[in-house]
Image: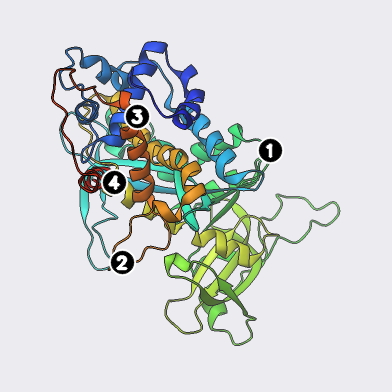
Amino acid sequence: MRTLPPKMVQALAPFAPLFSERVFRRARVLLIGAILAPGARTVSSALHAMGLDGEKRFHRHHRVLSRARWSSREAGRILLGLLIEAFVGDGPLILGIDETLERRYGKKIAARGVYRDPVRSTHETFVKSSGLRWVCVMLLVEVPWASRVWALPFLSALAPSERYAAKRGRRHKKITEWAWRLLLQVRRWCPQREIVAVADRAYASLKLLDHCRKLSNPITFITRLRLDAALYEPAAPRRPHQIGRPRLKGERLPNLSVVAEDPATVWKTTKIANWYGSGERMVEVSSKTAVWYSTGLFAVPVRWVLVRDPEGKFKTQALLCTDLDADPEEILRWFVMRWQLEVTFQEMRRHLGFESQRQWSELAIRRATPALLGLFSLVTLFAHQRMRQAAGALRRQTAWYHKRHPTFADALALVRKELWAQEQTLYGSPSATDTIKVPRVFMERLTEAICYAA
């Protein structure tokens, strides 16, 4: 069995109890191969990268995904613990929730559906695509050597289409229901930790917010709010001996669009660092509490936050938070962090072969994509120690582009170099071959080209 650098062996040791000894050996081969292989991340490409293209029992590596007994959910729990230990410590867990589309075609992929393609669609053009929809939970952390927030995936769930559920006689679950199940799982894993979840407007569901608020240890949920949302005063306290059902809300409040234009609204100027990746931005913030209610649904107390640009470069935005005592500026800072989720999805497609799987069995499909998403976090963990010691020297530089901080491409290249440096990672050369002297400059250029290959 090919060996790994000691730091990688230490990081992977907690995952060993999930597998039998034989399956774990093959899983490690697939892991190393997925890191080293450029382009598509199929089982075949991983075996090619490991020099096992002549392996006659190659089907046993396919069975790691399609037949072997192991739990991807337990793997997510272990990965979350490693990420918390490395990047978070005792602080609150900032979780980002979003869905992404894995474009897949084929009659054998039962769970696929036709959805809006967020990558190809614009405000003017609506593009639909066939594929699998995944709801992902990512840990938003400040990576010290990158000097910015990264979104590290650790838990994902396949959200099948409505047609898939109807054919099997099952109830269709919306993405908000899948988000609630994932958040509840994280709460069970971390019962005492403070958890803050940030998401876009698709998750502004009264049912989801009410569930998060009513937990014994509530989850603070932050999302966008419509400017015309129906907000009310809190319900008046009940009088002594009053009969009938208690009121859910008080008097109707003006729409936030009206509040934003009201000259009497009090605004506070604040500076937000790393505003959607464009550096510091001065914005004006106004905030109050209210009750968000819709007929037949839940009444949820929220703190709304209005954000506007004094320079008029973006339209007024509204956010909501289920924690009524939260600081409006902190709410805005947490919400701005969620733009990193799209960055992670883009890096996955560019560097880790996302959407290149070729499995047809349902179990393999449900395991392969979460494994690739988790690989993004594993690569970050593998590179963390070396990058923290010498991040400035481990980033790719050119004369025409000055890169201040390492990116994920640099982290992946560093991990690849460490793997290639292990003699046991590759097959040894036959003893009868002639020795060929290769110039060091040429070897360095060749190594860099291989390690930075997508």
Q: What is the CA distance from the residue labelled 2 to the residue labelled 1?
A: 45 Å
Looking at the rendered image, the disc whose residue lies closer to the viewer, 3 or 2, is 3
**Dot 1: within a 10 Å radius of its alpha carbon, few (fewer than 14), some, or many (20 or more) residues?**
few
Q: What is the CA distance from the residue labelled 1 to the residue labelled 4?
A: 36 Å
Q: Earlier in the sequence, mark 1 or mark 3?
A: 1
Is residue 165 something that shows in the picture? no
Residue appearing at x 58%, y 43% in the figure: 211
Residue placed most toward the observer, 397 or 187:
397
Residue wearing tag 3: 422
Q: Earlier in the sequence, mark 2 or mark 1?
A: 1
Q: Earlier in the sequence, mark 3 or mark 4?
A: 4
**Dot 4: within a 10 Å radius of its alpha carbon, few (fewer than 14), some, or many (20 or more) residues?**
many
Residue wearing tag 4: 351
Q: What is the CA distance from the residue labelled 3 to the residue labelled 2?
A: 31 Å
Q: Earlier in the sequence, mark 4 or mark 2?
A: 4
Looking at the rendered image, the disc whose residue lies closer to the viewer, 4 or 2, is 2
Residue 369 location, x and y as percent? 32, 35
Is residue 101 something that shows in the picture? yes
Residue appearing at x 54%, y 77% in the figure: 283
Q: Quadrant of residue 123?
A: bottom left
Which numbered tag is attached to residue 401?
2
Which numbered tag is attached to residue 192?
1
Q: What kind of element bears circle 1?
A: loop
